[in-house]
Amino acid sequence: MNVSSLLCLSPKFILPEDERPQLSAVTSLDSIPIIDLSGRTCNDGNPSSSLLIQKISNACEEYGFFQIVNHGVPEQVCNKMVTAITDLFNLPPEQRKHLYTADHTKKTTLYNYYLHVEGGEKVKMWSECFGHSWYPSEDIISFLPQEIGTQYCEAFSEYAREIGSLVRRVLGLISVGLGLKEDCMVKILGDEPRLRAQANFYPPCPDPELTLGLPVHTDFNALTVVLQSQVSGLQVIKDGKWIAVPAVPNAFVINLGDQIQVLSNGRFKSVHHRAVTNKFGPRVSMAMFYSPNLDTIIGPIEELVDEEHPPRYRRYHFSEFLQEFYNQEGSRRMVKEVFELPN
Ligand SMILES: O=C(O)CCC(=O)C(=O)O
Ligand SMILES: [Fe+2]
């Protein structure tokens, strides 16, 4: 793959020692579950469906992450998406430099994440991230050079349609896993969810021990579906140790966001993760974020609260959560902790 990186390993990308990824300490002894969806639905009474729900619940409690295979999204739709992202980041640097913005209120953004380190300095992440809504068309076409914009929008529209159904199906399995009705999460998250996408591009990095592709974070939304190209780089914390998420062909990575942790009253986890870089080749991923809209009220679901399980979070409008998220920009955010109730 031919890439035109905008990044060169200048001091502004080099992390202080205590923030470096320590790649040799990443364990290969554990890995997030790989779950076969094979056409199952929630309430078909089939024993293998109950097993599937059990596997998903266990993954949500233990890891907050899992991969799914045989999910029904055509391979060619995913391949087209990865190609469109790659072509976008193959644009000559001068054709995309001017698109950069740090203004997160813009509908479409090309963005470089950073980390605030001691002494108040910002260290840049070794990545470029293209963020937009799930209904792009005009926004994106006017943002990108025409040919790339058209190719990207075509690939994305098809991709978003598939992921839309997949997310609802996974939210159904998660709801049933919590002992709730299949449509419970989708209903709470509302008829007009906030749907954002982020295409991440990580060029090869001369020294992956000194940099990060994305800082350690949890996703602030409800559920994320990640498609990664055939290069791994995503890592997840489990029992205080980093574990790598392998690139499995035709799989999606599913991770729970903060809103599901709150709705499940802490039973299902939104877990810290990061993206690391590698020397050998570029890596591409697409994260599809499904959130409630700003006016939605989020708090532990009533059926999950009783004397034994008192509410662990106060109720809030999602807009409050988002405000707190942006207030903590650049730090290792602890957003949901702000909404915790004393026990
Ligand atoms: O690149 C990846 O695999 C992870 C992306 C991610 O965590 C995010 O976009 O929130
Ligand atoms: Fe993430």
Image (cartoon, grey):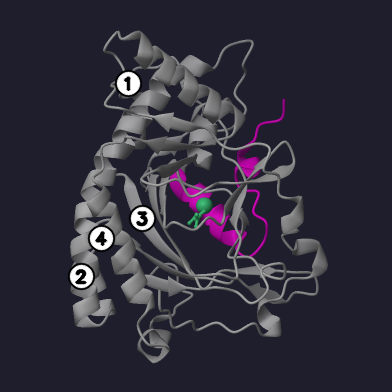
In the rendered structure, which amino acid carries the disc numbered 2?
Gln
Residues at discs 2 and 3 in contact (Cβ within 8 Å): no
SS type, badge 1: loop
Q: Is residue 79 visible?
A: yes
Magenta range is: 318-343
Q: Magenta includes 329?
A: yes
Query: What's the distance in space between the residues labelled 3 and 4, CA to CA?
Result: 19 Å
- What residue would you read off at disc 2? 151
Residue 220 point in image, percent of width and height: 51, 48
- What residue would you read off at disc 1? 182
Quadrant housing residue 189: top left
Q: Which of the marked residues, 2 or 3, is nearer the chain's N terminus?
A: 2
SS type, badge 2: helix
Q: Which of the marked residues, 4 or 2, is nearer the chain's N terminus?
A: 4
- What residue would you read off at disc 4? 80
Query: What's the distance in space between the residues labelled 1 and 4, CA to CA?
Result: 31 Å
Q: Nearer the viewer, residue 99 or 235?
A: 235
- What residue would you read off at disc 3? 196
User: Which residue is painted at 67% across and 56% down in the image?
Assistant: 332
Residues at discs 4 and 2 in contact (Cβ within 8 Å): no
Q: Point out the image quarter for the N terminus.
A: bottom left
Front: mark 3 or 4 = 4
In the rendered structure, which amino acid carries the disc numbered 3?
Arg
Q: Is residue 334 above or below residue 125?
A: above
Q: Which of the marked residues, 3 or 4, is nearer the chain's N terminus?
A: 4
Q: Which of the marked residues, 1 or 4, is nearer the chain's N terminus?
A: 4
In the rendered structure, which amino acid carries the disc numbered 1?
Glu
SS type, badge 4: helix
- Crowding near pointer 2: few (<14 within 10 Å), some, many (20+)? some
Residue 185 point in image, percent of width and height: 37, 29
